[in-house]
Amino acid sequence: MNPLAEELNSRLSGTVAGRLLSRMGSRLYFPRGIIAQSAEAKKSANTANATIGMAFSNGKPVILSAVADSMPAFQAEEIVAYAPTAGVEQLRKAWQNRIFANNPSLKPENFSLPVVVQGLTAGLSSVADLFLEEDTVIISSDPCWDNYTLIFEERRAGILLSVPFFGAEGGLDLNAIGSAIRAEAKKGQVRIILNFPNNPSGYSPTKTEAKALLPVGEIINDDNWYEYLKVFSVFGSRIGYRGLLLFFDECANLYKIVNRQSRENNYEKILAMFNDVTQGKASSLGVYMAGTPQFIEDERRGLFSYPALRSRLMDSRFVREGYADFASPILRLTQLSHEEIYLLLERLRDIHADHYGYEPYLEKRELAAFMELAFSVPGADEFITPREISRDFISLLNILHENRDTDFDALVYRDGFTVKGFSAAEYAEFDV
């Protein structure tokens, strides 16, 4: 695959567009040849532009008078220079502004400049090349424009799924359209094309039908999942609960994302959550995230690499050893003490016995022996986690329970391990 295509695919990684790309779409790219170079030079060349051979006089291209006279509405620069491949930028920006004005719900940061194409058929053909694979379903209406069959089925070998457009009582058949969308959604992706006024019938939906049609095509995805969670939290509060708590574990996986843009897209979503919760915009929502210190503090790839998050999450100057602000956004968990781990083992022992219906028989001596074995590994005091201790201890309980003729000493001491200097007083009962 061309390195330019690989670069584009990397930038689209994790996005809806990236997931929908066909094999052909993933191979396509815009060459960095003379056209791209001339566009770059037009913006950045302050001294001279040597990308296109043109003669200049008084800062303007020299052209034949007959050519200039035949196109009086254009400047010389517009006549002789290469036409921008995607269209004149001023036109594209004006077009984009018009789209935003007519569709206030669109977010500018998620919307690129429109691209000028040779016509509707050419534009749809380009879209099909990018996003339609052989034997991939694309939903359309019945009746539909006959060019759809030519573009999507004959040219790209896709499957045009025709859905009844009109219901038995007139108007749009929203049930048929909704059923087709939900059936495709179960496969993980939905491609649909509807045009209004409909070709060939000329029908346009009423305002009521348009409002009903929008939720039919709404699918929870990477762009809108958080908005749906906020709606769900409001729903929970209105049916009698205090709201919704979200727990995100293993957030260190965000820190491990190699692509910078994909990583920052996730951090931008975390910033949105932080602002909504702390500013009262999502009063029924609580968010907990669990991660390693590197996930938070690494200034190259962690949360602190994102300036807006760093300024909100950094500790106050008054936080120091021995003091903690439990109302701050970050709660730093300290290593469990030996006494706390001992209490954890007691609880695990009792839960295991209650679950399997027997009387606990491991006493202080055995629990202390297990702890000394666990902490006998060099560096265990600093690096051993409650997960590892709990896993090993429950495994030990399972083996003892499933092999009734085996006792604790036979398992723990089989490698010559002994408990040295054990004193029951060290693990006397206490309250936390």
Image (cartoon, rainbow, N blue to C red):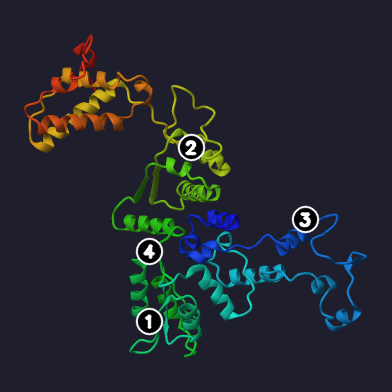
Residue, disc 3? 44
Q: How far apart are the alpha carbons under marks 4 and 2?
A: 33 Å
Residue, disc 1? 163
The local crowd at label 3, few if under 14, some if 14 to 19, many if 20 or more residues have their Cα within 10 Å, is: few
**Foreground pick, 208 / 155:** 155
**Foreground pick, 360 / 300:** 300
Labelled pair 3, 4 in contact (Cβ < 8 Å): no
**Foreground pick, 353 / 213:** 353
Among numbered discs 1 and 2, the one appearing first in the sequence: 1
Q: What element carries label 2?
A: helix
The picture places residue 368, in percent across and down from the top left corner, at 21, 18
Q: Which residue is drawn at 37% across and 72% down?
A: 181
The picture places residue 419, in percent across and down from the top left corner, at 21, 13
Among numbered discs 1 and 4, the one appearing first in the sequence: 1
Q: Residue at x 30, y 20 (%)?
A: 375
Among numbered discs 2 and 3, the one appearing first in the sequence: 3
Q: Which residue is drawn at 38% across and 23% down?
A: 382
Q: Residue type at mark 2: give it.
A: Ile
Q: Is mark 3 on a helix, strand or loop?
A: helix
Residue, disc 4? 188
Residue, disc 2? 296
The picture places residue 70, in percent across and down from the top left corner, at 85, 83
